[in-house]
Amino acid sequence: MRFHSVLVIVLLPILIAACGRTPVSSPPPTATVITYRDPSAPIAERVNDLLQRMTLAEKIGQMTLIEKNSLTPDLVRDLAIGGVLSGGGGYPQAENSPAAWAAMVNEFQQAALSTRLGIPLIYGADGVHGHNNLYGAVIFPHNIGLGAANNPQLMEQIGRATALEMAATGVFWNYAPAVMVPLDVRWGRTYEGYAERPDHVAALASAFLRGLQAPDIAAPNRVIGTPKHFLGDGGTAWGSSTTENYKLDQGETFGDEAFLRAVHLPPYQALIAEGAQTIMASYSSWNGQKMHASSYWLTDVLKRELGFAGFVVSDWAAIDQISPDYDQAVITAINAGIDMNMVPYDAQRFIDSLTRAVERGAVSEERIDDAVRRILTVKFAMGLFEQPFAHTALSDQIGSAQHRQLARTAVAQSLVLLKNDANLLPLPKDIGHLYIGGQAAHDLGIQAGGWTIEWQGRTGPIIPGTTILEGIQAAVSPQTVVEYNQHGRFTGDPGAADAVCIAVVGELPYAEGRGDSASLSLPPAENRVLRRMEEACVRLVVVLVAGRPLLVTDDLPKWDALVMAWLPGSEGAGVADVLFGDQPFRGRLPVTWPRSLDQLPVGSGDGQPLFPYGFGLTP
């Protein structure tokens, strides 16, 4: 008996455990909740808990942002990478579709979640006029056109539509809005700026950010924006760039601090007040110092004076330009205030360099913790820890009829009427004959410009949409004879009494410094079209498709009407809506239109410009 009693006492807990039951007398088990994984805990507590669990390698991994073509999901996991991006043209290699985008981003995200601490990555892209790397997304007018429309309510709607299309593919971080104040329209990024006046820029960019970051877009996530490029990128001097054959882009902004504060700083102040959580530093320099190396502007002014609590991200390989000594460039940039480094090609090189810097005391652990704290705070605020994957349920928003109508409205509101002799515009829909020339009339790639599918964009049917020609054909009556010839060579009589000619001519696509222009002129082929049509037509309307004002002073007297269409994007029917009176001309110039190159940058030279800021006719 005694032996059996002892045996029962020994075996009882084992038998109970095997049956999955707990003795009544035992206290119930309690699970320890890890604070950083508790969505009900305050964000600051979650950040503190996670930060104290991280190794130096994991912290530096969070500070590393890599272009998706330069890494694999395994590398994301092995290096605990904090961010991945698609550069211009960074669509999935197999297929540029919403499903392929979501699968690509989710695969990287799954790798991040499989790390020791399971910190989600943040995936970013330049959605500068819609989710413009994605085939099938709606392509809105570039910012300069939206600056001409100058409608904050419209901007908020565009921000929201862009966020929905990006969230559907898992891209919750948008490198927009650009809040530069372009002062020299020869700059290849002029079309990325809303206007030449800081209050104009601030109002529209703030509205876009409100729409983009609306908290209910993809709950529990928030898409976030990135005001860029801090600071002064729109004020660089001609010939000051040292990058490739650029002339303005990534160049030098001269002038005293008061100038930067008065002209280039106000949009950032406005967007910080609107809740900006990331800001991208500028390639440009100020009086000899790269902005990526300026602790005064990045830390003293941006973070301390303006109270920016988010994180600062570098531009593409921009810290490499600080010094030919890469280790010194890394030390300088991180100490200046760069929190996350956009390293397009070699993650390990940056990680090794920053690790060495910390180990030898060139970058303090306190500075690393500050950067990582900022990054983690944003990730928690976005809801990435609760829902890190693409919101594929939103896929029906991509290229939706509602978003295309919004873009069409934006196009119509952006058009600026600069000349209209004898009130030629708007045209009657039952006009007898229309003769339309110019490559830009029937080319979606020219309509959309740079940052469309590819970084530099390209000509041709690169996106789904409606060309300006197709919009015109749909607008006129069935009896109207429309003849289109790209080269302006017509078989009919463009000089007939019932005929009007429309030359739709434009710049070829470009982006950034590759678009810096010494001449501000149309391509030779488009100029030849104009000469032919000027000679053959009795009544000539010129529709200019460009990312900035071009020099047309000598040609303007030969034209009966001039319409600036900017870079309208995928919905060319919006141009026809205004040409034929379904919508009024309401756009106003957001930048000064120079009479000659001597009047650049704005305010230079003698005499009046060809058209001043704010100009626009209303028939």
Image (cartoon, helix red, strand yellow):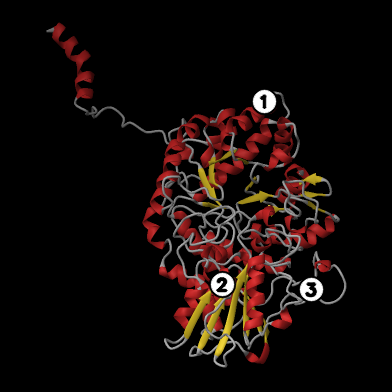
Q: Nearer the viewer, residue 111 or 335?
A: 111
Instruction: Tell me: 593 left or right of 56.
Output: right
Q: Nearer the viewer, residue 497 or 609?
A: 497
Q: CA distance from mark 3 to mark 2?
A: 33 Å
Quarter in which the N terminus is drawn: top left
Q: Amino acid at mark 1?
A: Arg
Q: Amino acid at mark 3?
A: Arg
Mark 1 or mark 3: which comes first in sequence?
1
Q: Is residue 495 above or below residue 69?
A: below
**Secondary structure state at the residue bearing disc 2:** helix
| Circles 1 and 2: CB atoms closer than 8 Å | no
The residue most toward the left is 1
Residue identified by numbered label 1: 356
Instruction: Tell me: 284 left or right of 565.
Output: right
Mark 1 or mark 2: which comes first in sequence?
2
The label number, if any, that marks residue 595 in the structure image? 3
Q: Is residue 228 visible?
A: no
Q: Is residue 305 above or below residue 16?
A: below
Which callout, 1 or 3, points to the residue nearer the camera? Answer: 3
**Secondary structure state at the residue bearing disc 1:** helix
Residue identified by numbered label 2: 153
Q: Nearer the viewer, residue 217 or 176?
A: 176
Q: Amino acid at mark 2?
A: Gln
Q: Name which quarter of the figure residue 187 lies in.
A: bottom right
| Circles 3 and 2: CB atoms closer than 8 Å | no
- Residue 202 in the image: state x and y as whole percent: 67, 65
Q: Is residue 542 visible?
A: yes
Q: CA distance from mark 1 to mark 3?
A: 55 Å
The residue most toward the top is 3
Mark 3 or mark 2: which comes first in sequence?
2
